[in-house]
Amino acid sequence: MIPTTQDILQRLLRYRKVAERSAVAATDGAANTSYEVFSVGGTDQYHTVLTAKAAIALADTTAKQQPNCTVAVWSPLRGLIYRARYETPEALVDALLDYIWNSSQLSGQYKSVAANQTDLMENGTYDGQVAFKAFWPVADAAVDQYTQQYGTAQQKQFPHDIRQMMAEKMVRLFEQDYREQPDRFEQPTEPSAQQTIQIDPTDSDGKTIVINIG
C-alpha cells in the first residue's frame, strides 16, 4: 500500500524523536534547517541533507535500493516536497489484483470469465492459453479504472508486461480455485418447472397445492 501524506508525517515525527535521543543527531543541529530524507516501510533510514537537489537524488537512490518502499523528502518550510517509490513487477500485479477484488464491477467481470472457464473445465475443453486471452480484458479494465481514479500519470506503471503478468496470475488463481472448490464459479441453474396437483376433495379440503419438481 502506498502511504498517504499523513502516514509520511507520522513516520517523520517518529524519526525526529529517535534523532533527538541520539547524541550524533543532537550535535548535528541540521534537523531544523536541512532537508530530511527518510523511508516509510522497508529498512528504516533517516538523513539530513543541505540542498533539495541532493535530497531528491538521495531519495531516488534509496528507493531503488528498497523496492516497494516509499522514500520521502521533507522541507522545513514547504513540508513534503518529493517522494520516490520503485515497485517490483510482482508488487504491482498484487496491488492491481487487490484493486480488482475490492471493486464489485471488476471482481464481477473476473467471476464471469471464471464461470465460463469452469464450464470448459467441466466439458473437458479447457485450454490455458484460451483462458489467458479471456482474462486479459479484466487486466485492461482494471488498469483503465485505476488510472481514471488516481490519474493518467499512473498509466505508465502498468505497461504491456505487467498486464501480461496479471492475466497469467489470474489464470493460475482460477486453476487453483477450481482444484480446491470446483463448483465455486458454476453458473446458477434455471428454476425448476412447476407442476400442479389436484387433491381428491374426499381426502382434503379440495385446495390446489403447487409443488416444485426439481
Image (spheres, grey):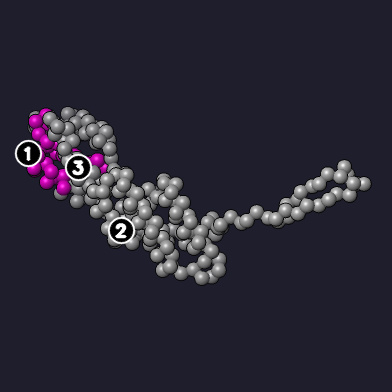
Residue under label 1: 51
Q: Nearer the viewer, mark 2 or mark 1?
A: 2
Residue under label 2: 162
Image quadrant containing the C terminus:
bottom right
- Horizontally, residue 186 falls left or right of residue 45, namely right
Circle 1 SS class: loop
- In three-dimensional space, the C-alpha distance between marks 3 and 2, rounded to whole angstroms, equals 23 Å
Q: Residue at x 16, y 44 (%)?
A: 59
Residue that sits furthest to the left in the current view? 50
Crowding at mark 1 (Cα within 10 Å: few <14, some 14-19, many 20+) = few
Q: Residue at x 29, y 61 (%)?
A: 161
Circle 3 SS class: strand
Give the extent of the magenta segment.
31-60
Q: Position of residue 165 (x, y in %)?
A: 34, 60
Q: Residue at x 28, y 55 (%)?
A: 158
Image quadrant containing the N terminus:
top left
